[in-house]
Image (cartoon, grey):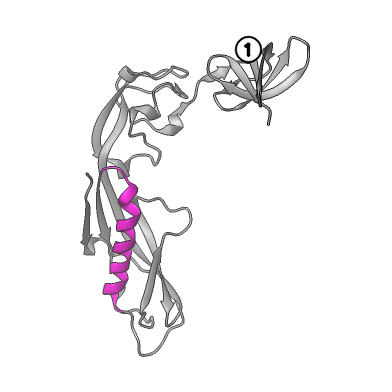
């Protein structure tokens, strides 16, 4: 069971970007701002695999923001969930303002590495993988953590043994290949018809594929593993 460790540290003391209309006399207390960031990141990190450690950076004590009674943290669009990041905090009442606080979310857990060298196009099997424990937040954002995410997929590129395995390194093998004889299964309410044909395109399981039937008619359906194309009629 993973745990979330919350720590406030000065080491992440980076410049804080503030956007508001200055007031001459009031300043926002940094403590509730940093507490809101910690609360938000703790919730966001619950779905992350492994042990999570959250560090919240400093918030400028000499800010000129009006004191806020209702704070709301958010991640800017395109932000990743772990690693070094910037968390936005907006004031909802009594005055509207926004500020940004640096933070770091570190995740230690299990990820997959190649147990043997993989060649481009090779179908990955269970013996081609092994698990390692390390810092997930230093790996690619799409690093794989479970063998079921990789077994049966084809390597897009050649990979040496011991390399972390990411989703972008893999692709599903084709279910049908252009020029291959295929079986076309047409299904609908109360009927099922099978025809022979030739695939006019290469497609993975679940992708659309065109087939020329033995009659010369060209139809489109969904490629399925096993060399057949499925057509569903409502």
Expressed as whole percent of the image width and height from the top left, the position of residue 73 reads: 38, 65
Chain part drawn in magenta: 29-50
Q: Is residue 178 visible?
A: yes
Q: Quadrant of residue 8?
A: bottom left
In the displayed structure image, the side of residue 201 where residue 1 appears, left or right = left
Quadrant the C terminus occupies = top right
In the displayed structure image, the side of residue 212 where residue 140 appears, left or right = left
In the displayed structure, 103 sits above or below 210; it is below
Residue designated by label 1: 182
Give neighbour class at mark 1: few <14, some 14-19, many 20+ (Cα, 10 Å): many
Residue at left offset 46%, top offset 82%: 21
In the displayed structure image, the side of residue 154 where residue 53 appears, left or right = left
Expressed as whole percent of the image width and height from the top left, the position of residue 7 reads: 21, 60
Expressed as whole percent of the image width and height from the top left, the position of residue 44 reads: 35, 55
Residue at left offset 69%, top offset 24%: 220
Secondary structure at numbered mark 1: strand
Residue at left offset 73%, top offset 13%: 213
In the displayed structure image, the side of residue 80 where residue 204 appears, left or right = right
Please tell me whether residue 151 belongs to the stretch shown in magenta: no
């Amino acid at each position: 069971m993973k745990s979330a460790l919350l720590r406030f540290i000065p080491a992440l003391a980076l410049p804080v970007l503030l956007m508001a209309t200055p007031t001459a006399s009031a300043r926002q207390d940094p403590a509730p701002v940093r507490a809101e960031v910690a609360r938000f990141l703790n919730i966001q990190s619950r779905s992350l695999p492994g042990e999570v450690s959250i560090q919240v950076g400093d918030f400028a004590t000499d800010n000129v923001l009006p004191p806020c009674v209702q704070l709301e943290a958010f991640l800017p669009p395109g932000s990743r969930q772990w690693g070094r990041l910037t968390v936005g905090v907006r004031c909802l009442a009594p005055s509207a303002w926004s500020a940004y606080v640096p933070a770091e979310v570190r995740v230690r857990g299990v990820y997959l590495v190649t147990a043997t060298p993989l060649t481009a196009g090779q179908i990955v099997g269970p013996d081609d993988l092994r698990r390692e424990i390390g810092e997930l937040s230093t790996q690619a954002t799409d690093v794989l953590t479970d063998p079921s995410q990789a077994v049966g997929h084809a390597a897009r590129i050649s990979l040496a043994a011991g390399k972390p395995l990411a989703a972008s390194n893999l692709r599903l093998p084709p279910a049908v290949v252009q020029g291959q004889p295929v079986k076309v299964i047409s299904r609908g309410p109360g009927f099922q018809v099978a025809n022979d044909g030739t695939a006019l395109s290469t497609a993975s399981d679940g992708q659309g594929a065109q087939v020329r039937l033995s009659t010369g008619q060209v139809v489109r359906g969904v490629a399925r593993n096993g060399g057949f194309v499925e057509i569903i009629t409502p």
